[in-house]
Amino acid sequence: MQIKNYIVILLIAMTSTFAGAQIKFEAKASKKKLGVNERLRIDFEMNQDGDNFNPPDFANFTVIGGPNQSVSNSWINGVRSYKKTYSYFLAPKSRGTFTINQATINIDGETYKTTPLKVEVTAAVDIPKDPNDPNYLASENIHLVAEVSKTNPYLNEAITVVYKLYVSPKVAVDNWNEIDSPRYNDFWSQNIDTQNQKVQNGTYNGEDYRFLVLRKTVLYPQKTGKLNIEPLSLNIAMRVPSNRRDIFGSLLMTRVNRTVSAGNKTINVKALPEAGKPADFTGAVGDFKFDVSTSKTELDATESLQLKVRVSGNGNLKLFNLPKVTLPSSLEVYEPEHTENVKTNLAGMQGSISDSYTVVPQYKGKYPIPSISFSYFDLKTESYKRLSSNEIIIDVLNGPSNGVNSNENNSANNNKQAVVYNDNQFAFIKTDTTFSAIKQSHFFKTNLFWYLLLLPFLAIPLAILIGKQKAKRDADVYGNKIRKADKLARKYLSSAKKSLGQKEAFYVALEKALHNYLKAKLHIETSELSKDRITELLNEKQVDANVITDFNSILQSCELARYTPIDNVTMQEDYDKAAKTISLIDKQAN
């Protein structure tokens, strides 16, 4: 009887052990029904550690947090209790009833799956405001604002976007970084330097705040209609007060990460009026002055003078073409040299642009340079204005005459002399012959014969030397790679020059040329072509900081060209700047 009791007790203990050792892997949702503006927490729990955890794809949800991992391990009355949890925080994308699919994990060589969960997402619900919730405190005490100077500008009228970060005195910001930068499609854009900006005091919604100007951008819309200004988004690490205090009675701060966005801005761009638009209007918008001048008005033939066409003022100076000069055919005119002296601030572009022509007169005389006109749209009066230059007379004092006038022709005709015939009219025709005997020359045994005979023997040492040099060069794999990259740089720079006027082809070829030049000069691979790495290596080569900045700005221009409109003048400037920068790096790099 006692033996049977022992067997029963043993069976019960073994059953309890097996039951306690049963593996569990399940999914739990914080709620089965939530509003579209609420958050959902999903926990995947297991009672034994495993490998290769595979979460579901969370279709119809955005993962805003996780995976967060927690482990609980305890002993109670000699019995071990273990729990491991993977937690995700989800935001629904839309309303509806959705299924969260299975998660999988491998435990002791076997794969376990969770049961799918169904979650219903309803319309937005009122979320109670918890003044002790750190996330709520963060959302109420920090704001990113985009201030647009004008929401209904004309085409090519300057507007500004200023991004300000408002922070309440109740919280503290430790750090921030941009997670999404606006690209300003359909705008010509220029960022204004905001370094060394100081924190200022101001108000937000009637309350005292501190604010910092993060970015200032000048925009010139390049098309009409409704245009979207993309938002700037920041990830901010901050500290907010909690409801706990330290031993001295001061409030303890809680660290929170908060994502803030300036939000989309829409502006309505008006087209320039068609009524009264001049035929020679090329898109200039602003307030300008126009001037045509020459370096001299009196000179001799074959001397040169400079004819300058200049526009100055405030407006879209880089986005229109200067009027062309038409001169008499007796004045030789060379292609103009374009010069820009433009600064961009919150008021837009200010400064001047000019075309300087070299003019060389060929003949003596007086040559008029006719009046040249320039048209622009004046934003103050919202009307078109035309500016015209005065006629300039170029007096060429000395030089050959350009033809003969009619009086001189008549005088010449009256003073014609009769032709006097000579008795020996055919004196230039020879009547006697002078023949000379043909001397036959033989090539054999001449000096040239001996030179050509010995030439192959003299060329053998030279061929051997050239062969050795070629073999040595072929064996230099690293050097060949450098020469190949340098050859490609010259090739693409040549291709970029041929593509001037074709924005995308030009900047693709220019960017390839710069990259291949760097590979040849700095001995790096394509994978190392980052801005920081390039700057570091050029600094090691003792290249001037200004040259490094110019080189990086050219690369940035290549990247931004696909998003912004570029004219031929800008492309020519970028090409010249690239050629000059490469030359400077070659001279300075050790």
Image (cartoon, helix red, strand yellow):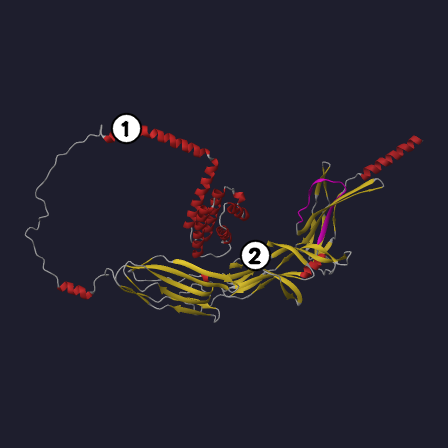
**Identity of the amino acid at label 2?**
Pro
| Foreground tag (2 vs 1) | 1
Q: Residue 111, image x and y in percent?
A: 71, 39
Q: Is residue 69 magenta?
A: no
Q: Locate residue 549 relative to residue 450 in the image: left or right.
A: right
Q: Secondary structure at mark 1?
A: helix
Q: Residues within 10 Å of mark 2 (few under 14, many from 20)?
A: few
Residue 453 circle label: 1
Region rendered in magenta? 39-58
Residue name at image x 72 percent, y 49 percent: 42
Figure quadrant of residue 166: bottom right
The alpha-carbon separation of the residues under discs 2 and 1 comes to 76 Å
Q: Secondary structure at mark 2?
A: loop
Q: Locate residue 85 relative to residue 151 in the image: left or right.
A: right
Q: Residue 440, image x and y in percent?
A: 17, 31
Q: Nearer the viewer, residue 340 or 77?
A: 340
On the question of residue 223 being in view, the answer is no
Residue name at image x 56 percent, y 57 percent: 182
Residue 219 circle label: none
Q: Is residue 56 magenta?
A: yes
Q: Nearer the viewer, residue 353 or 42?
A: 353
Residue 182 circle label: 2
Q: Nearer the viewer, residue 311 or 85?
A: 311
**Identity of the amino acid at label 1?**
Leu
Figure quadrant of residue 484: top left
